Every structure is written in structure tokens, then in C-alpha cells.
Image (cartoon, grey):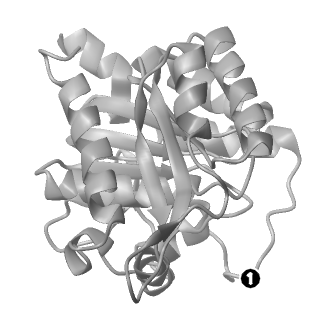
Amino acid sequence: MEEEAAERGNLAGVRHILLVLSGKGGVGKSTISTELALALRHAGKKVGVLDVDLCGPSIPRMLKVQGKDVHQCDSGWVPVFVDQDKSISLMSIGFLLENSDDAVVWRGPKKNALIKQFICDVAWGELDFLIVDTPPGTSDEHISTVESLRPYKPFGAVLVTTPQAVSIGDVRRELTFCKKMGLRVIGIVENMSGFVCPHCSECTNIFSKGGGEELAKHAGVPFLGCVPLDPHLAQSLEEGKDFIQEFPKSSAFPALASIAQQIVDRTSPQGS
């Protein structure tokens, strides 16, 4: 066991590694990653978030830690802690940019090298879950992330889609990517599944509904649930507030809590 822990290095204390993927942009991967981290924290878990969306590092703002500095220790980089209890830690290129408006204009090899450094050189400590938020697509950065994580045996991937057919098609390609890379699909989340009126709480299906569930059935993978568009959720992300704590009566709350609980159940010894 000691030899295995030594081989795992800075990930030795991480029990479960989850990747959040989608074949396209704009479906809310960072939103799901952030809210999943908060929901798991409320379930009593210690969580790390690794933001490998190098060109669009939005999670520092969503967790209200933009502008924080990353420090060095003997084991490498110390992630930024989101709360005083140190129950959520975050690593993102957003902390390494001199100016938050700086564009990351890098070729593939430099991006891949930083991803490998993020995976090997961040001192996460003891974590129940490490959530890896990825950029859109199925190309270099995804291959580099999955191959770099392979020695650490990631638990699997959560795929995020919106209900429209164009999004479903791209996520279908992501399922193929997972199969080719030997990455287990934990389940599919349908995000932006209806709009919740802030006045009457009625849910209107702006983008249609049910595409994610149909895709899950067709692919033979679990469907984790639908998360509606909710102005309160958008407000929480803009202001860096804990949506799970601030708006427990929102219709998005039980959806996010249920997704987190399903993941907890599947990572328990009985659910494995």
C-alpha cells in the first residue's frame, strides 16, 4: 500500500477522481462542476476542483476566489481553499495569469505540459472527490488529461448536455471518446432543462426536454437528472455564492442534490 501511495504522489490522498465532459461548449460544464462540488461539500465530503479549461477558467469567479495567489510547498503548488474549513480546494490557470483579462494563446504542447503539471504537482492532501472540469471537445487537452490521470484510476466521467438535438449529437461523440479511452461513464446530466420563472416558479421548456435521458437510454448509461435554468442559480454563480445554501427552495436544488447523492452512492463500497 505504501508503494502504491508513493507512486500516486500528490494524488495519493484522493479517493475518487471525476471528470466533467461534454462534446461542445456552452452546456454548463463549469456550472455543474461548481455546483457538484458544493453539493458534495454539503453531503459532508472534502472536495477538490481542477479547472483544466485553460482558455476559459471561470470557476475561480464562480467560487468567489478570483485574484487569489497560488503558493509553493515542498510537494508542489498549494491549491486555493474556498472556505475556512478547507472543505473545497481549487486549482486553475486563472490563479497564474498576471491579469484576469489575459488570453491564453498557447499551442497544444504547452497546454498539455501544464495539464500534466496540474495533475502531478498540486498538493491536494486528503480528498473524497477531485472534480476535473474540462474544456469543450475531444481533442489534445482531453487526451492529455485522461492519459495523465490513467495511472491514478479515475472513477469515471459525468457528461453534460442540453436538451437540443445539436448538443445531444456532440455528447454522443463524447461517449465514443470515453469508450475509446477506456473511461467509465458515470452518467449524463441534462442541463438547462426548462426555465424556472422567478415569479410563479412555473417551468417552461425553452430548449425542449428529455434529449439527455433518451441519449442515456440509447447508450445504456445512467441518467443522473435534469437541472433547469434558474435565475437564482445564475445569480449565485455571478456573485460567487453557495446556491445550495442560499436557495434551498429552488427547483434546481433537489436536482443538484440528487445528482451528488447518486455519485456518492455509486462511489460507496456497496455501490461500486
User: Which sits in the foreground, 182 or 247?
Assistant: 247
Q: For residue 265, what is the image quadrant?
A: top left
Where the N terminus falls, by quadrant? top left
Amino acid carrying mark 1 in the image? Asp
Q: Is residue 44 left or right of residue 160?
A: left
Whole-percent x, y for residue 60 in the image: 49, 71
**Relative to 64, residue 163 above or below:** above
Residue drawn 69% across and 56% down? 54
Q: Is residue 69 visible?
A: no
Question: Badge 1: how crowded within 10 Å, few (<14), some, or many (20+)?
Answer: few
Q: Position of residue 208 (x, y in %)?
A: 64, 52
The residue sitting at 87% across, 61% down in the picture is: 105
The residue pinned by badge 1 equals: 101
Residue 214 in sight from this viewpoint? yes
Left or right of 261 on screen, residue 165: right
Q: Dot 1: what SS?
A: loop
On screen, residue 132 versus residue 267, left or right, reads right
Foreground pick, 180 / 10: 180
